[in-house]
Amino acid sequence: MILEITTFRLRDGVSVEDFLSADKAVQTEVFPNTKGYLRRTTARSDSDEWLVYVLWDSEIFIDEFNARVIANPVQEAFDGLIQRSTIRSTRYQDVGG
């Protein structure tokens, strides 16, 4: 399994409510029935940094998803709320235990 962790900050002026609405739309409209997708969670730190954790069956599914989702209007709306310069994404291989 692959854990994909993405951290970021919201653009200035974006309300938490608007972001959570866009996040829910991504969660319910973009990810369901995606091959290799297992789970997705969004979290927020006390310093207003956000984290999205996605669990995938394997890395190939992440690349396929990213190539396909780039033109999805729901994903585009979500991405438009994020400060692009703050995005950090890392993939981790599950080692069990």
Image: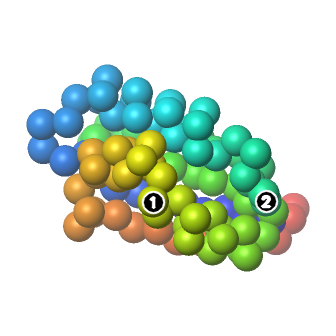
Compute the Cα span from label 2 to label 1.
19 Å
Residue type, numbered disc 2: Gly
- The answer to whether 93 appears left or right of 8 in the picture is right
In this rendering, the count of numbered labels is 2
Q: Residue at x 23, y 56 (%)?
A: 83
Q: Position of residue 6 (x, y in %)?
A: 47, 59
Badge 2: how crowded within 10 Å, few (<14), some, or many (20+)?
some
SS at badge 2: loop
Q: Badge 1, how many Cα within 10 Å: few under 14, some, many 20+?
A: few
- Image quarter of residue 86: bottom left
The image shows residue 53, relative to residue 71, as above or below, that is: above
Q: Which mark is residue 36?
A: 2
As rendered, which of 63 and 88 lies closer to the eye? 63
36 with respect to 92 (left or right): right
Badge 1 is on which residue?
A: 71
The outermost residue toward the right is 97
Q: Which mark is residue 54?
A: none
Point 60% across, 33% down: residue: 28
Residue 8, quarter of the rendered image: bottom left
In the depicted structure, whether residue 28 falls above or below residue 75: above
- Left or right, 31 with respect to 81, comes to right
In-image side of 56 versus 15 (left or right): right
Residue drawn at point x = 27 percent, y = 45 percent: 81
Which scheme is used to colour this image of the protein?
rainbow
Q: Nearer the viewer, mark 2 or mark 1?
A: 1
Query: Residue 1 appears in which quarter of the rendering?
Result: bottom right
Screen quadrant of the C terminus = bottom right
Q: Of marks 2 and 1, which one's residue comes earlier in the chain?
A: 2
Q: Which three-letter amino acid code belongs to the residue tagged 1? A: Ala
